[in-house]
Image (cartoon, grey):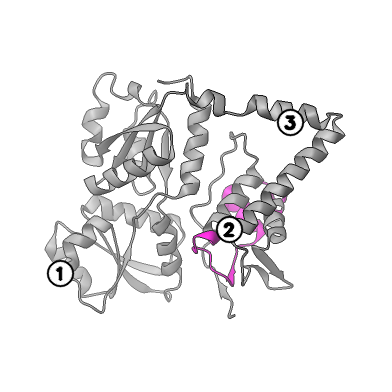
Amino acid sequence: MARESSQIAPPSELRVNRKSVVPVHVQLQTQIRHLIDIGSLKPGMQLPTVRQLAGFLRINRNTVARALADLYQDGYLESHQGRGTFVADRPPAREGRTARSLERLVQETLDRARRLGFTLDELTATIVARAPAARTARRTRARILLIECNSPELSRYREQLEEELPVTVDRLLVEDMAVRFRESGFLRAYRVVVTTFFHIHEVKQALPLDGPPAVALLSEANISSLLRLTELPEGSTVGLVCSTPQGSQNILSSIQSAGLTNLVPILASAEDAWSVDRMLEKTRIVVCSEQAAGRIVDRVPHDVEVILAYRKLDTGGIEMLRDLLSHTEGGQP
């Protein structure tokens, strides 16, 4: 299989939470596995170096090396002398990988307990006592505020978050955010404010200093979109379209944050037909939000490649949100 190099330095959705009880190397290992499982990192694709990953995430190189070593052992990655690290041509099936990882975790736990002088019965009794099942029924659903620029995505993201997390989600449009934030006591009702990376800067600027923490999540389509854009030749012209001019600016900010300096962006707004026509005169590649795509579909020629910028929220980010909520339980209501 021909090898392809990843120009991302490194995949922009990788995040670590240093305050988490989950070790950093496990967080990184899990996220990279997830990207391979969903096909965002494809067989034969080259990964950034240990140095690049460590620099991007601002963590120790040994931590990165440990995460990659586990992925080598599970059969997800392979190393080629003098060339680098690549996604394996045939990554293991999810079922087999999960079984091996759990088996290794159990064995490591048993070995460590034995070195500390604990018996198997003592370890088993402690695991049973610490199991969260008995406490789950008494735990109330956390109330969070979800902010996005359009109603369809608010509805879809709320449904996903409420399905996967013990939360009750209230929705708020970006355009209404500043007014609502000024209402006395409005933000005290929420444990956390959630948005996507396209709007995180706006949200953080609008939040008062004593407001709840703001969390940015990625959509799974976002990483695949960025990977597609890295393949374009230097100087490629790309249209960026959202429902509003501010939304288009947010897409531009995301592309710039990912280090995609090979592109020449042209911004347009679905609410301004003239800007869309002007953009289509200059490019045959368009990055577009789902809502904007529905509004401009009749204006886009068949030879134009449309890359959707939004879709389902990334499961790795949702797990990070779960961890944050568990650590803030008992704080804000």
> With 268 as the anchor, is 320 left or right in this view?
right
**Labels 3, 1: front one:** 3
Of pointers 1 and 2, the one earlier in the residue sequence: 2
Give me the disc on residue 298. 1
Q: Which mark is residue 259?
A: none
Q: Quadrant of the N terminus?
A: bottom right
Residue type at the position of mark 2: Arg
- Depth check, mark 3 against mark 2: the one in front is 3
Residue at 20% x, 61% y: name it: 294
**Which residues fall within the magenta stretch?**
36-65
Nearest to N terminus: mark 3 or mark 1 = 3
Q: Where residue 123 sits in the image (x, y, percent)?
A: 76, 30
Residue at 25% in and 40% down: 174
In this rendering, the answer to whether 54 lies above or below 110 is below
* The C terminus, quarter of image: top left
Q: CA distance from mark 3 to mark 1?
A: 63 Å
Q: Nearer the viewer, residue 286 or 160?
A: 160
How packed mark 3 is, by other alpha carbons closer than 10 Å (few <14, some 14-19, many 20 or more), is few
Query: In the rendered image, which residue does mark 3 sit on?
Result: 124
